[in-house]
């Protein structure tokens, strides 16, 4: 028997070190890589058999066998694929041995150090083993690797190495086509634990379940192997089947296994795209979070998310963030494509236009589904919205291209309807038949008749706060209640960001109901009120100046009278383009620096306390302080000096 010893060249020796210690982040990957290589060999044999019907000979079954010796601590992977000749073993074990250059190895070093180094796009190939280094992942867990292989028309070859820089090649008595890889597991880092039937079964299910050739292992009886073998993998994935072949129950079973959610999905989206890009996907929109999901997201939104990504039926990434916008992290899905370029470890996606196109298509499909469900499954959608509204609001804020369509999915509490409504329902309720074009509203604005409603009619009004219950008590709503004008009550901190991003909807502007320039009613009445207010402000300028002087001009920009707050005493108004109190709360909660904002205090001159003071024509500093503090309390819900405030109130009452 001829035996020869060879020495790896310097580049390949470095490569083995990189693969063993740096390139792969998880030792479990070794089995996936070796199964992928075996699958590649079987696929090549299948293609050759199509050209030559005698090629397969007596070995007609293309399969991959996995065997475990728990005593010897070995794992053996055998395939009936194309096999290799002696020359091919020397030249092609790990394609890098043939095409490797020092520059390429240096590039791998940089990838290992940076982990996510971006590379130029590569032309995709049909076989994912395009880099040819997956074989060397065996050295992550093995102290010695043997390879026994035979190609049609060639003698069998036995290759072995300990990965120390040398390898040996001898003749083999193997008589059948194919390749066998034997891993002698090392006793370091608990690698011998891989000599376990149950663990390998789990790894096959986890990473290679949909490899299109059968992967077999010996059956287990009472946890012990018997001679009879069984197929471990499913081979054909659900998403590669035709929709007409799949029952609803199959979708539900797959969803439950994927999510650990015992109830079925709200909707299932099955995508099969062929053209400039090629991919298949299964997307599941949940009805509500499962217990597992609630626990996962309970610790914050820094958790891993993203679809399971398959290439040629091999699981490449479990959480492919690059395919999933963060605001859709509640979607459960699987994506399979041959069009993505991968880095050498198959664990990090390269940045390319294919990825962006796939993501865009997935987002469009989710949006289409939710839009349909919101119209046809209103009760179910209401339940879904209660659990996932925050994600939809993030989506509105970040996705400028689809902003209005996503906004149509939002629901807000209506002041007049006293229930949650959409923006479209708000418009319909307010104007019965909303104008289809902005020009129509402009014609309305040109009408100069004194009884024509003001231009404020053509706004979608909203008011933000800590909760809907709190907002309902706001003095800002008084004029809206009087004139039966609806307001959307937004009690979620995220709504502050929504209104910054979504400034209009279907040509109609969104306007904060607390804005100081809102005047509802007939133009004639508004003009009359303005003249009366101007007269009062001129006559009692001393009172308004006294408030600014006493409260400090560092916190107040202006003091003015108003007739718009009903029986309330005073309110603080935020000037346009300045952060509202609710936004300040959000910013502070996020640890952001909040610039000082000078607000406008609006005072009701008809309130008995104010009217009495105006008649005295002399400022009462205690009342001035109370005016500001109670207005501040309405906005913020708390004062720094609550004890002092209560003391002043008690003193005023006792007079």
Image (cartoon, rainbow, N blue to C red):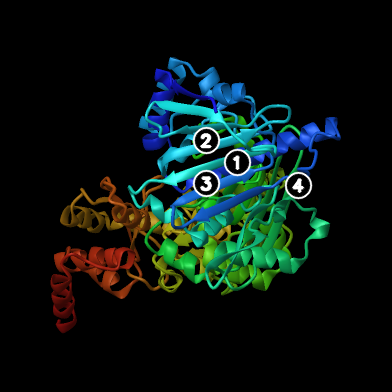
Q: Label 4 near label 3: C-beta < 8 Å? A: no
Circle 1 SS class: helix
Q: Earlier in the sequence, mark 3 or mark 2?
A: 3
Q: Residues within 10 Å of mark 1 (few under 14, many from 20)?
A: many
Q: Nearer the viewer, mark 4 or mark 1?
A: 4
Front one among 421 and 27: 27
Q: Earlier in the sequence, mark 3 or mark 4?
A: 3
Q: CA distance from mark 3 to mark 4?
A: 21 Å
Determine whether, in the image, residue 143 is placed left or right of residue 518.
left
Q: CA distance from mark 4 to mark 2?
A: 24 Å
Q: CA distance from mark 3 to mark 2?
A: 10 Å
Disc number at residue 61? 4
Q: Earlier in the sequence, mark 2 or mark 1?
A: 1
Q: Label 1 near label 4: C-beta < 8 Å? A: no
Q: Earlier in the sequence, mark 3 or mark 1?
A: 3
Circle 2 SS class: helix
Q: Position of residue 644 (x, y in %)?
A: 13, 71
Question: Quadrant location of residue 80?
Answer: top right
Q: Earlier in the sequence, mark 4 or mark 2?
A: 4
Disc number at residue 36? 1
Q: Earlier in the sequence, mark 4 or mark 1?
A: 1
> Residue at label 3?
31
Q: CA distance from mark 3 to mark 1?
A: 8 Å
Q: Nearer the viewer, mark 3 or mark 4?
A: 4
Q: Label 1 near label 2: C-beta < 8 Å? A: yes
Q: CA distance from mark 4 to mark 1?
A: 17 Å
């Amino acid at each position: 028997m001829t035996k020869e010893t060879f020495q790896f060249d310097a580049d390949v020796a470095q490569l083995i070190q990189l693969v063993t210690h740096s390139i792969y982040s998880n030792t479990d990957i070794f089995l996936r890589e070796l199964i992928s290589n075996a699958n590649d060999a079987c696929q090549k044999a299948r293609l050759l058999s199509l050209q030559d019907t005698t090629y397969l000979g007596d070995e007609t079954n293309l399969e991959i066998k996995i065997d475990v010796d728990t005593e010897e601590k070995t794992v053996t992977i055998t395939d009936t694929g194309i096999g290799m000749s002696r020359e091919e073993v020397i030249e092609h074990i790990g394609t890098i041995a043939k095409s490797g250059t020092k520059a390429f190895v240096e590039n791998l070093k940089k990838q290992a150090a940076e982990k996510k180094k971006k590379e130029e796009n590569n032309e995709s190939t049909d076989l994912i083993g395009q880099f040819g280094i997956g074989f060397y992942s065996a050295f992550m867990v093995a102290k010695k690797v043997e390879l026994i292989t035979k190609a049609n028309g060639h003698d069998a070859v036995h290759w072995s190495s300990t990965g120390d820089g040398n390898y040996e090649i001898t003749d083999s008595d193997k008589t059948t086509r194919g390749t066998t890889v034997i891993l002698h597991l090392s006793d370091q880092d608990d690698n011998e634990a891989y000599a376990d039937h149950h663990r390998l079964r789990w790894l096959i299910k986890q990473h290679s379940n949909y490899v299109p050739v059968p992967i077999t292992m010996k059956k287990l009886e009472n946890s012990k192997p018997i001679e009879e073998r069984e197929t471990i993998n499913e081979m054909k994935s659900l998403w590669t089947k035709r929709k007409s072949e799949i029952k609803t129950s199959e979708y539900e079973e797959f969803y439950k296994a994927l999510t650990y959610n015992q109830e079925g999905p709200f909707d299932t989206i099955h995508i099969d795209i062929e053209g400039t890009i090629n991919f298949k996907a299964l997307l599941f929109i949940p009805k509500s979070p499962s217990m597992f999901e609630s626990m996962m997201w309970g610790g914050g939104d820094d958790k891993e998310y993203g679809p399971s990504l398959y290439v040629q039926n091999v699981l490449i990434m479990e959480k492919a963030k690059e395919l999933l916008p963060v605001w859709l992290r509640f979607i459960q899905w699987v994506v399979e494509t041959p069009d993505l370029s991968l880095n050498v470890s198959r664990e990090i996606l390269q940045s390319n236009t294919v990825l962006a196109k796939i993501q865009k298509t997935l987002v469009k499909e989710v949006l289409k589904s939710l839009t349909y469900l919101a119209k046809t499954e209103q009760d179910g959608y209401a339940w879904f919205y209660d659990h996932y509204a925050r994600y939809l609001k993030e989506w509105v804020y970040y996705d400028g291209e689809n902003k209005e369509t996503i906004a149509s999915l939002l629901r807000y509490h209506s002041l007049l309807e006293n229930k949650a409504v959409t923006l479209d329902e708000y418009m319909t309720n307010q104007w019965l038949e909303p104008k289809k074009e902005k020009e129509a509203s402009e014609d309305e604005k040109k009408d100069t008749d004194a009884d024509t409603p003001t231009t404020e009619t053509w706004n979608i009004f909203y008011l933000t706060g800590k909760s809907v219950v709190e907002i309902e008590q706001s003095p800002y709503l008084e004029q809206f209640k009087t004139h039966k004008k609806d307001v959307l009550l937004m009690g979620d901190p995220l709504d502050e960001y929504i209104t910054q991003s979504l400034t209009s909807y279907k040509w109609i502007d969104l306007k904060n109901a607390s804005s100081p320039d809102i005047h509802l009613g007939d133009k004639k009445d508004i003009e009359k009120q303005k003249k009366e207010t101007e007269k009062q402000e001129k006559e009692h300028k001393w009172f308004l100046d006294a408030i600014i002087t006493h409260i400090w001009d560092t916190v107040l920009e202006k003091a003015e009278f108003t007739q718009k707050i009903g029986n309330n005493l005073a309110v603080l108004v935020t000037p346009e383009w300045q952060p509202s109190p609710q936004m300040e709360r959000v910013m502070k909660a996020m640890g952001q620096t909040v610039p000082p904002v000078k607000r406008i205090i609006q005072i009701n001159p008809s309130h008995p306390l104010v009217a009495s003071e105006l008649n005295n024509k002399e400022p009462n500093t205690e009342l001035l302080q109370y005016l500001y503090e109670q207005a501040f309390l309405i906005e913020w819900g708390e004062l720094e000096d609550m004890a002092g405030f209560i003391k002043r109130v008690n003193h005023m009452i006792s007079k």
